[in-house]
Image: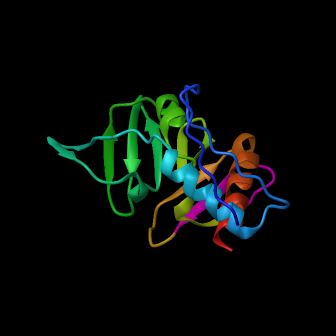
């Protein structure tokens, strides 16, 4: 594998190009690392009672809205945040995907999807009793993102 870095004063934004004969697991891993490193994840403050919490986004299982308030769910706790769901959707890294009008999920924590062709599909997480539902409308994008995750892990 050859690696070449070109420095140019003429460009306004950095660009990474991967040239390959085929997409191998090695190429997919490189792509994943670049995407994760370049993701401009928001610095979120999580609120509970009168306290502010600061911890990595990777700890979050999912975000959901309830009565115009957005909640972030970790394995064992729930926190309020001050962003709207649509703002989160635009700012979160690729590991997060919208699964319904009121929920964004972190695919890295999904253990199982119980697919239901006629209604919402049940999602369960590793090491947590929490679960959410993916609507039929959003199921395709969830499935695609989970397949991407599977190909990176191999």
Residue 72: x, y in percent?
39, 47
> Was residue 13 drawn as part of the magenta stretch in this picture?
no
Q: How many marks?
A: 0
> Was residue 123 drawn as part of the magenta stretch in this picture?
yes
Q: Is residue 103 visible?
A: yes
Determine the image quadrant of residue 6: top right
Q: Give the colouring mode of the picture.
A: rainbow
Residue 14: x, y in percent?
56, 36
Of 3 and 131, which appears nearest the observer? 3
- Judged from this view, the residue extending furthest toward the left is 50
Residue at horizontal 35 percent and vertical 54 percent from the top: 56
Determine the image quadrant of residue 33: bottom right
Give the quarter of the figure containing the C terminus.
Answer: bottom right
Of 124 and 67, which appears nearest the observer? 124
Left or right: 63 as drawn, with respect to 95: left
- Location of residue 2 with respect to 19 vertically, above or below: below
Give the quarter of the figure containing the N terminus.
Answer: bottom right
Residue 28: x, y in percent?
69, 61
Of 105 and 55, which appears nearest the observer? 55
In this picture, which residue range is highlighted in magenta? 114-125
Q: Is residue 113 visible?
A: no
Residue at horizontal 76 percent and vertical 48 percent from the top: 140
Left or right: 22 as drawn, with respect to 62: right
Residue at horizontal 46 percent and vertical 40 percent from the top: 40
Left or right: 148 as drawn, with respect to 104: right
- Location of residue 12 with respect to 140 vertically, above or below: above
Residue 10: x, y in percent?
58, 25
């Amino acid at each position: 594998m050859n690696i070449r870095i070109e420095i140019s004063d003429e460009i306004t934004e950095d660009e990474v190009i991967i040239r390959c004969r085929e997409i191998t697991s090695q190429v997919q891993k490189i792509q994943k690392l670049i995407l994760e490193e370049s993701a401009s994840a928001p610095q979120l403050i999580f609120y509970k009672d009168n306290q502010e919490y600061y911890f990595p986004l990777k700890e979050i299982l999912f975000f959901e809205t309830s009565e115009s308030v957005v909640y972030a769910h970790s394995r064992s706790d729930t926190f309020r945040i001050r962003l709207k769901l649509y703002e989160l959707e635009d700012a979160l890294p690729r590991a997060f995907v919208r699964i319904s009008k009121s929920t964004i999920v972190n695919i890295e924590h999904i253990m199982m999807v119980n697919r239901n062709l006629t209604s919402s599909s049940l999602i369960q997480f590793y090491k947590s009793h929490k679960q959410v539902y993916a609507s039929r409308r959003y199921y395709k994008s969830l499935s695609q993102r989970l397949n991407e995750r599977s190909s990176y892990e191999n």
